[in-house]
Image (cartoon, grey):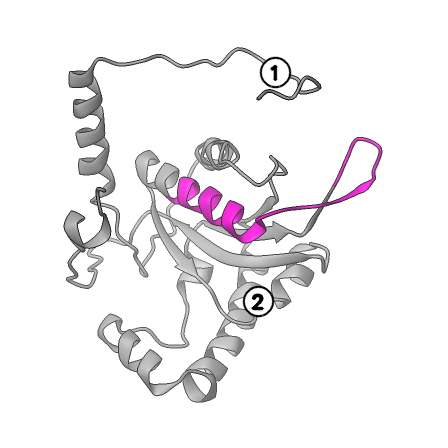
Amino acid sequence: MTNKDAITEPLVFQPKPAEQMQKSAREFYESVRTRRTVREFSDNPVPRGVIENCLRAAGTAPSGANRQPWHFSVVSAPDLKRKIRIGAEAEEREFYTSRAPKDWLDALAPFGTDANKPFLEIAPYLIIIFGEKFSRDQNEVKLKNYYVSESVGIATGVLITALHTAGLATLTHTPAPMKFLNELVGRPPSEKPYMILVTGFPAEGTTVPAIGRKSLDDIASFL
């Protein structure tokens, strides 16, 4: 049933032959399977236009009631990156020394992580992702947003994939709590920091942990 009051437009959709669909799906998988989280970044500059288009891609993600409840604060200023590092490392020291249970620390041990986060200053861009609990309509009336975490999570996945496709490396960094970020980048208290997405080129000679991926049988069921 269609809502008669809804404003619609023609769907732009170009079907592909089955063979082309198979080829496109396989090529995308082969590309995205090379994505790895890195913790060693180069300070080589990245054109701002690349970041802008990746953010535009993230903005196409589906969201509850199409409220698009996300905001991306893009930080490149060295002094601000320094302040973010100081704030994040303060929370991380608390995490590693007193907040994290032993099983969590044991799970992190193979990755060699600790409270020191130099990449927050070295990488050319830090994208601070916020979830917006409320929106405002054209008359500035306050509106509740729905499925905020789910919507922001989908948009973040699109952003990570877009950055990888553009030729950049990423790191999802989630110091907890992250409320210090609101003040540093000038976002209102009603917005919840979701993560710091670090992006740029990997440093020369970067290594990553040797890990496996679950098989299709492990992650999917066809019923």
Seen in the image, is 53 located left or right of residue 72?
left
The amino acid on which the numbered mark 2 sits, given as a three-letter code, is: Met
Q: Is residue 45 visible?
A: no
Seen in the image, is 141 located left or right of residue 128?
right
Taking depth in this image into account, of 41 and 221 the one nearest to the observer is 221
> Does 78 lie within the magenta span?
no
Find numbered disc 2 in the image and state the secondary structure of the residue it sits on.
loop
| CA–CA distance in space, label 1 to label 2 | 39 Å
Of badges 1 and 2, nearer the viewer stands 1
Where is residue 14 drawn, in percent x and y?
35, 12
> What residue sits right under mark 2 in the picture?
178
Of callouts 1 and 2, which one flags the residue occurring earlier in the amino acid sequence? 1
Which image quadrant for residue 114? bottom left
Q: Residue at x 68, y 17 (%)?
A: 4
Seen in the image, is 75 located left or right of residue 202?
right
Range shown magenta: 136-160
The circle drawn on residue 188 is none
Taking depth in this image into account, of 159 and 103 the one nearest to the observer is 103
Which image quadrant for residue 112? bottom left
Where is residue 142 drawn, in percent x and y?
79, 44
Find numbered disc 1 in the image and state the secondary structure of the residue it sits on.
loop
Which image quadrant for residue 168? top left
Seen in the image, is 67 located left or right of residue 44?
right
Q: Residue at x 28, y 81 (%)?
A: 106
> Does 141 lie within the magenta span?
yes
Q: Residue at x 53, y 35 (%)?
A: 59
Q: Quadrant of the N terminus?
A: top right
The amino acid on which the numbered mark 1 sits, given as a three-letter code, is: Thr
> What residue sits right under mark 1 in the picture?
8
Q: How many marks are shown on the rendered structure?
A: 2
